[in-house]
Image: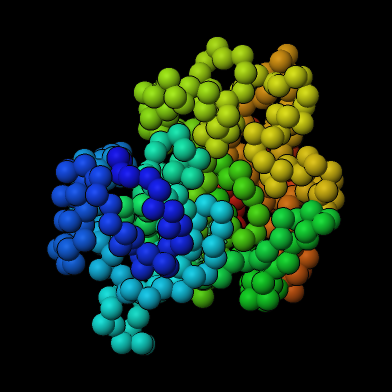
Amino acid sequence: MRVCRGSGRRRFQSCGFASRAADGCLLMPMALVLLAASMPGAGAAENWTAVPQLERLQRIDDWLSQTAGAPAHWRVRSKGDVAGNGKILVESHQKEVNLSWFHKDAKEDAKEAVIVKALHKGGHFDFGHRESDIAYFELLYLEFLRGEPGIPVLHGGWVTKSHVVWVTSHGGRSVGSGLGRTTDPVKMAKDYDRRARKHPIEVAKAWFRCFRSFGERGGFVLTDFKPEQFTLDPAGDIYLVDGPAPNSGPIAEFARRHYRSKDAVYADHIWVPGDKKLPRHDDLEPGRSWPCPTGQNTDCARRSYKQHHCADGHCESKETVGAPEIRACHDGTCDAFDWRVHVYDVAVRSWLLPRIIGLAKDRGAARRLEELSAAMRRHDPGDRPSFDDLLRKLDAW
Ligand SMILES: Nc1ncnc2c1ncn2[C@@H]1O[C@H](COP(=O)(O)OP(=O)(O)O)[C@@H](O)[C@H]1O
Ligand SMILES: [Mg+2]
């Protein structure tokens, strides 16, 4: 997307869901696309089930590179499809997250809440730029896993002169906060704990469904692993609301094309077979068998961030350390890992199964979960049950 840099307007709300700053150096095709996208009522959305998964991803690429308008199967294709006055929920380094609603004229009780996210990067979207990539991966995650349990619905989005904006369903409140270190302990939401106490098996199933969707089915690994990435909605479903890294499978392959084609600029962002050094960009396929840097085991774990493995020595307990394959370095090569690290995570992290087991009033249910947990903690990822297996076991009980 070629747009002038430098409007410097980073706050989403100050743009009113779209920058109004004059920008005289837009290329003509971009100007036409923007004009079309800003017209309200772009027509009914195409039925997404009729569009193959990878074609839906390609539509996102075409939209971001401004060779086409917003995908035709999106319900939201312009800022006019969403009410104008959003409320900022969270403003982070990378994104501004707003609460808003469909349709300006909806009555209060008929309003359907949506989440509107804007990428914090004034100027232009650019593959290989960290903030742009974060938005891109989240869009691929939402689009590829559309319709799966635990994945927010991507309603659509629009592009302004300086922001990429996307709109998803509202997944409820975060299940908790804190990083799970001694200096920043996890604090779970009261609603979440109440549900875990009363309905431990249902809560465990909601977690398994969510992890099955993004890990087992999507091939994603969540590197920024912490409670506030997950929400609990009033129906008891749990959602992963922050886009994870495409680690393996068709989405990772799809995403990598952008970095390969720009080898002069972005070659050091990805790992290419044969490379002796680690890539700068460990968000993309963190689980690949990269070379161990300087032979230190803990550096292997850095592929998956501190929150995931607690290698900085500030974990709540030794048990909260992530799966062994994340840290393993053999003969100069970090062990490869995949979504099965999350089977281990769910069993060991204090705020996941251990908390449900601890809170459950029904001690019989707690024992069932303990039984599953023992298998989930097996050293060899191949010996751990899949999330699909776990759900089948709970359904059969
Ligand atoms: N779909 C959603 N439903 C409900 N809350 C959400 C949703 N998306 C984001 N949030 C809230 O906004 C916070 C920040 O969003 P997130 O996408 O995680 O941004 P960041 O990448 O900056 O961490 C989340 O921790 C969550 O509390
Ligand atoms: Mg987040």
Q: Identify which residue is drawn at 41% across, 36% down.
A: 127
In the rendered image, residue 369, in percent from the top left (x then y), is placed at: 70, 58
Q: Nearer the viewer, residue 126 or 75?
A: 126
Q: Nearer the viewer, residue 252 or 192?
A: 252
Occupied quadrant, residue 326: top right
Horizontal side of residue 300 vs 60, given as left or right? right
Q: Identify which residue is drawn at 56% across, 70% down.
A: 173
In the rendered image, residue 62, in percent from the top left (x then y), is placed at: 26, 41
In the rendered image, residue 272, in percent from the top left (x then y), is placed at: 51, 18
Q: Identify which residue is drawn at 32% across, 59% down.
A: 21
Asked whether residue 151 is in view, the answer is no
In the rendered image, residue 92, in percent from the top left (x then y), is placed at: 56, 58
Depicted 71 relative to depicted 235: above or below: above
Could you tell me which quadrant the N terminus lies in? top left
Asked whether residue 312 is in view, the answer is yes
Q: How many marks?
A: 0
Q: How is the image coloured?
A: rainbow
Q: Identify which residue is drawn at 43% across, 58% down.
A: 9
Occupied quadrant, residue 81: bottom left
Could you tell me which quadrant the C terminus lies in? bottom right
Horizontal side of residue 80 vs 258, given as left or right? left
Q: Nearer the viewer, residue 163 or 177?
A: 163
Occupied quadrant, residue 308: top right
